[in-house]
DNA sequence: CTGTTAGCGCATTCAA
DNA sequence: TTGAATGCGCTAACAG
């Protein structure tokens, strides 16, 4: 591999000069510059980023820690981060940390070893306290899809409560009175907040969200959706609409209803949450809340970079809003 | 940031000793080791990977260049690579190179600057010649989902022809005689190979793949699928089954058929290719060819690592086979 | 088993 | 405008 020294030698200048023309800063004479550039091109010299990082004490890369890139939601997260990163001429380091707190901690540790100062972290297994400790040690660590009140200015999150209210209200406004909810058994914070939101909206409409109309799936995916709605159906529950914790469960619900000869939306309406790519693949296309994960991730990456190289913390929090996407999975009763 | 020197000073040993206990290699006395380890823990010392990479002249990271991680296919690719990487204690560097040859070249260049010796590259915009030149310069560069005959031992690819034949034969075996094909207008190599495969299988069954029964969509996604099938339908074509270039187009086909009151699979059967997560989200669930992208990517990453640190090239090629996944989108006429 | 020395590739003073 | 010197944090001989 050709180094800066090789270039300097061939061009008959010092390494400092080569360094200057490579980074396009500092004063370099015109002829000298073109001469050096010529040698660089001829030799195919490419600066060693590791050496640059070492000497400049910054890695110019931002790390993204997520459960698994292959899940569309996290893929979008990674992409959003990358957008921001490209603008800043940073690099993206993605670490999948699936399944355990230890995996997440290991991922962060790896990033620290890289001297990666800016990190966007989507944690699912660490508790607030652990996260606070980490945040203390790493100024450029930003949490996405999570609110930790003590360090809310380091959190980029979504107003799930309002979003949940909106989608429940949408159902109510379309004339639905018997509304079921499908959620995951291990209710995580998101699921809880959304559930609260549904309840608020339903109560505000002078309706009841009967606990017996809440179906639980072991996990929050397609199978979980099938399981949850099957439970409800097997108990003979009646409803005109079902709100699902997320799109995956909603799709499971649709499939299970279909398997039982119940049409969506003619017999039962279904809504999801997240607006994953899946929601336009299923039939009918799913009405759902759009989770602006790409924008949020892009924002988070910028925030992480900002925080990592300037101590100044704005103190403000970073809250995003989901919005309703109307598609074909809800029937309207045309009421006023 | 605490460095190896700090640890050495506090522990009262030399940096070499610290280095030895950190990397768990070389002989270190028992007491000495525990003493040093203790200081490491107390100080929270983490080795600087950039410095390690610099001095050892290898970055221990593999780069993955793909169009966009947020697309489920590429997300899976990245995940597969990561599996292999974790085993080898390497890091994953993902670069999205979307839309142009230049973007792809830039991505490779960035990886070179990182001294990232092992690269898995899914190129869509570079021609074979360009790729050969790159391969020449970078021993650890491996191409995925692509066959370049001159450097086939550096290619990890799928037998699309055989796969295409298999799915077409499946339709034939289920009694379908009028089979339409939906593909993309800008027929890329994959699409061409698959088309050839369909044709072979259909001819072998003494049937005809009439060119007028091939529908084209502007792009290879859901909208392209709708567009392509709409063309066919608007021309009054009749068929009992449609083979789609990929799952996305198949989903578009299903949606468009549904919009026109044509039932799948009762009236028309539909098959896809790739077995993306989307194929189980749609209704009916899609019968398709499974593309083992995760295993292929894992294999490719291993190959890249192998190639990058030993010149030996086995010379063998790396061909994978897709397999049929039967779901609910095909009707059988129960013929022998 | 442990320490000393040298140098990886580069950016950054400081002089000239 | 340019070059010489220094050191980033670490590993790898080598010597003891």
Image (cartoon, coloured by chain):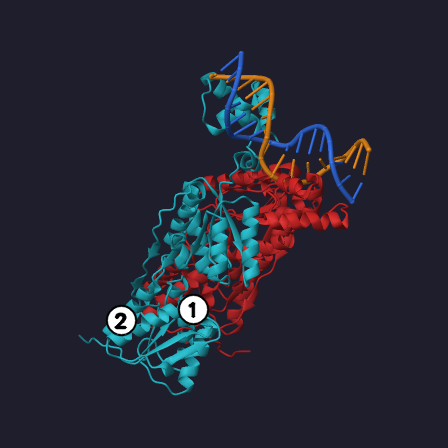
Chain colours: A cyan, B red, C blue, D orange
Answer yes or no: is residue A65 visible: no
What label does residue A169 carry, if any?
A: 2
Residue A80 drawn at (x, y percent): 41, 51
Question: What residue is rendered at 40% in x and 62% in y?
Answer: A276
Q: Quadrant of residue A204?
A: bottom left
What label does residue A248 carry, if any?
A: 1
Residue B117 drawn at (x, y percent): 61, 42
Marks 2/1: CA–CA distance? 21 Å
Q: Quadrant of the N terminus of chain B?
A: top right
Label 2's element? helix
Q: Quadrant of residue A14?
A: top right
What is the crowding at mark 2: few (fewer than 14 residues within 10 Å), some, or many (at least 20)? many
Q: Is residue B138 above or below residue A267?
A: above
Q: Earlier in the sequence, mark 2 or mark 1?
A: 2
Q: Is residue B234 above or below residue B307?
A: below
Q: Nearer the viewer, residue A3 or B254?
A: A3
Which residue extends farthest left? A336
Q: Is residue A174 above or below residue B64?
A: below
Which chain does tag 2 point to? A
Label 1's element? helix
Question: What residue is rendered at 30% in x and 69% in y?
Answer: A165
Residue D6 relative to residue A282: left or right: right
Answer yes or no: do the residues labelled 2 and 1 have beta carbons within 8 Å? no
Which residue extends farthest bottom? A236
What is the crowding at mark 1: few (fewer than 14 residues within 10 Å), some, or many (at least 20)? many
């Amino acid at each position: 591999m050709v180094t800066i020294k090789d270039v300097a030698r061939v061009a008959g200048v010092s390494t400092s000069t080569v360094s200057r023309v490579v980074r396009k800063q500092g004063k370099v004479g015109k002829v000298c510059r073109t001469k050096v550039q010529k040698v660089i091109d001829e030799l195919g010299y490419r600066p060693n980023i590791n050496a640059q990082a070492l000497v400049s004490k910054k890695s110019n890369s931002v790390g993204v820690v997520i459960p698994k890139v292959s899940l569309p939601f996290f893929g979008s997260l990674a992409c959003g981060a990358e957008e921001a990163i490209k603008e800043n001429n940073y690099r993206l380091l993605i670490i999948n940390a699936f399944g355990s707190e230890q995996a997440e901690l290991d991922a962060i540790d790896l990033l620290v070893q890289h001297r990666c100062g800016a990190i966007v972290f989507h944690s699912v297994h660490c508790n607030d306290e652990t996260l606070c400790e980490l945040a203390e040690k790493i100024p450029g660590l930003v949490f996405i899809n999570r609110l930790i009140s003590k360090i809310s200015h380091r959190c980029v999150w979504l107003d799930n409560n309002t979003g949940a209210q909106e989608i429940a209200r949408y159902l109510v406004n379309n004339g639905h009175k018997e509304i079921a909810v499908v959620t995951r058994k291990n209710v995580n914070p998101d699921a809880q907040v959304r559930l609260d939101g549904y309840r608020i909206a339903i109560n505000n409409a002078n309706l009841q969200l009967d606990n017996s109309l809440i179906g639980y799936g072991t996990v929050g995916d397609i199978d979980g959706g099938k399981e949850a709605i099957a439970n409800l159906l097997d108990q003979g529950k009646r409803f005109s609409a079902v709100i699902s914790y997320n799109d995956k469960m909603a799709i499971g619900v649709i499939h299970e209803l279909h398997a039982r000869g119940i049409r969506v939306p003619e017999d039962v309406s279904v809504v999801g949450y997240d607006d994953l790519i899946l929601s336009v693949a299923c039939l009918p296309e799913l009405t759902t809340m759009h989770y602006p994960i790409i924008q949020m991730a892009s924002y988070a990456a910028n925030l992480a970079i900002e925080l990592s190289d300037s101590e100044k913390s704005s103190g403000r929090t970073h809250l995003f809003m989901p919005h309703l996407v109307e598609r074909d999975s809800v029937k309207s009763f045309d009421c006023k």
